[in-house]
Image: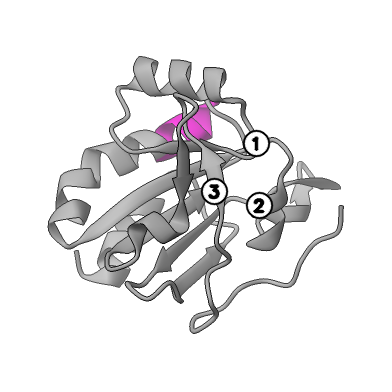
Amino acid sequence: MTENSRLAAGDAAPDFTLPDADGNEVSLSDYRGRKVVVYFYPAASTPGCTKQACDFRDNLADLNGAGIDVLGISPDKPAKLAKFRDTEQLTFPLLSDPEKTTLTAWGAFGEKKMYGKTVQGVIRSTFLVDEDGRIEVAQYNVRATGHVAKLRRDLSV
């Protein structure tokens, strides 16, 4: 698997259809007409990913109030996502991409530094997709902690 070039503001957001935690198919095109945050994270139920997901959960009412939905995508299988959702009481869709095709298409899978070593893995990334399906904001290598607060400041939400 090779690292795709990164997406930037103005690019068309690569469409996808992925199963959610309950196995229902969710497509990016389902969100046309609304803004949506699409964020990629390495693994459900790990400390950083839990903190990030809970931050989105805790800020979801304000984001929704500003007309922004949230989708989280990881390589985890739906059953693991369901357990993560239920344990952390997450109220937005978590999508499963075990083949990493969507992660790769969005530039969120590839080489990254981890503990000083170069490894292949999920690059923690967040995007804001506009009502027409174009990338409005593209952020790679975001921090799990404090990221949602920074995103809210950047978006004036």
Q: What's the magenta bit mostly, secondary-structure-wise?
A: helix
Q: What percent of the width, then of the height, locates residue 119?
A: 84, 46
Task: Name the foreground residue: 50 vs 64.
Answer: 64
Q: Secondary structure at mark 2?
A: helix
Image-quadrant location for residue 75: top right
The residue where tag 3 is placed is 17
Answer whether labels 2 and 1 touch (C-beta < 8 Å): yes
What's the distance in space between the residues labelled 2 and 1, CA to CA? 8 Å
The residue where tag 2 is placed is 103
Residue furthest to the bottom in view is 10
Residue type at numbered disc 2: Leu
Image position of 51 with respect to 4: above or below: above
Residue type at numbered disc 1: Pro
Q: Secondary structure at mark 1?
A: loop
Would residue 45 be visible to someone looking at this image? no
User: Seen in the image, is 106 located left or right of residue 83?
Assistant: right
First along the sequence among labels 2 and 1: 1
User: Seen in the image, is 101 located left or right of residue 137?
Assistant: right
Residue type at numbered disc 3: Thr
First along the sequence among labels 3 and 1: 3
Q: Residue at x 31, y 70 (%)?
A: 154
The residue where tag 1 is placed is 75
Q: Residue at x 51, y 27 (%)?
A: 47
Q: Residue at x 64, y 53 (%)?
A: 102
Q: Which residues are magenta?
A: 45-52
Q: Is residue 46 magenta?
A: yes
> Tag 3: Cα neighbours inside 10 Å, few (<14), some, or many (≥20)?
some
Image position of 19 with respect to 106: above or below: above
> Tag 2: Cα neighbours inside 10 Å, few (<14), some, or many (≥20)?
many
Would residue 118 be visible to someone looking at this image? yes
